[in-house]
Amino acid sequence: MNGLENTSLLYLEDVYKIYGGHTVLDDIDLAVASGEIITLVGPSGCGKSTLLRLVLGQEFPTSGTLLIDGEFPGFPNSTRGIVYQKYSLFPHLTVLKNVTAGPELNLGFFERRQKKAELIEEAEHYLEKVRLAEHMYKYPHQLSGGMRQRVAIAQSLIMKPKILLMDEPFGALDPGTREDMQMFLLELWEEIGMTIFFVTHDLEEAVFIGSRILVLSQHYTDDRGNEDGVKRGAKIVYDHSLEKMASATSVKDKPEFSELIRHIRQQGFEPEYQQHVKDFDLKHHHSFRTINQPEYDPE
């Protein structure tokens, strides 16, 4: 432990995830402060969704420490909201009812009746936040894809999670709607100050949205050798702060934006670019690495 476990909202140290002898996540170290937008990218099959499931509590590490607010988080609960690419809406319920459904499920029959007006008022508050108040009595099939995704975000926000997990949430949207949703999410983040853990395969989206970007990759080398018995998994090979200067999508046209994407692609997506574990580009002020001796032997 290094002290960050006591001050971080999300803390992972020496986290491994192994399936049937196959190492997917290999010694993951990560400390996340409250209020960050973490964007996570990496090559296909590197374990991005696996890491998200560990944070959500759908799965548990094979070994290592994972804490939320200094405590073992256990199974999925209201401390972690989740928004998937596929909208998690009830088709037979109105927008308003979809948003109140989560808190209602946590209440008994009589308490639900007593708090009905309070829940509706709270749901209306979050529908205002996601700009859907005027559509609260519509059904999901009457909404556009972007609107349905905003309902899903309101569903999560009303549960007041400590961290909002988003797994390719805009991946099914057309390019114009996707950019609108990126701007919407940034504006909502600036207003509410929530902590977001955002998984995407789109580097442009990751750099535009994130206040911090992580690259998870299996393309690296270390001192364990290349014999058949060596089982490497993905590690965090890149961890940097990002300047939130994006008040408009026009920032994507700037040369420095494109250069940063090129650099990130080199760091984690190109198999021939084999960084040694001791040379990972971990510049964020909360970055840390616990390197086991077999991985790095100075002798």
Image (cartoon, rainbow, N blue to C red):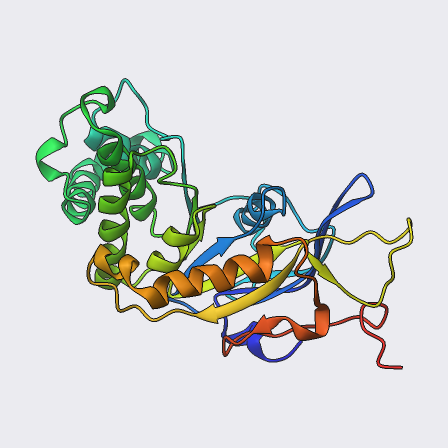
- In this picture, residue 178 sits left or right of residue 85: left
> Could you say which quadrant of the image residue 223 lies in?
bottom right
Residue found 52% across the figure and 47% down from its top: 56
Residue 228 in view (yes/no): yes
Left or right, 285 with reference to 293? left
Q: Residue 298's x, y, as percent?
A: 84, 81
To which quarter of the image does residue 148 belong? top left
Please tell me how many numbered marks the rendered image carries.
Answer: 0
Residue at image position (40%, 67%) is: 34
Residue 263: x %, y % from top left: 50, 64
Residue 128 screen position, x and y as percent? 14, 46
Question: Most extreme residue toward the left, as rendered?
Answer: 134
Quadrant housing the C terminus: bottom right
Measured from the top left, where is residue 154 in percent x and y? 27, 42
Question: Residue visible at 41% across and 55% down?
Answer: 206
**Residue 79 seen in the figure:** no
Residue 96 lies, with reference to residue 36, above or below; the image says: above
Closest to the observer: 198 or 250?
250
Who is closer to the viewer here, 219 or 134?
219
Screen quadrant of the N terminus: bottom right
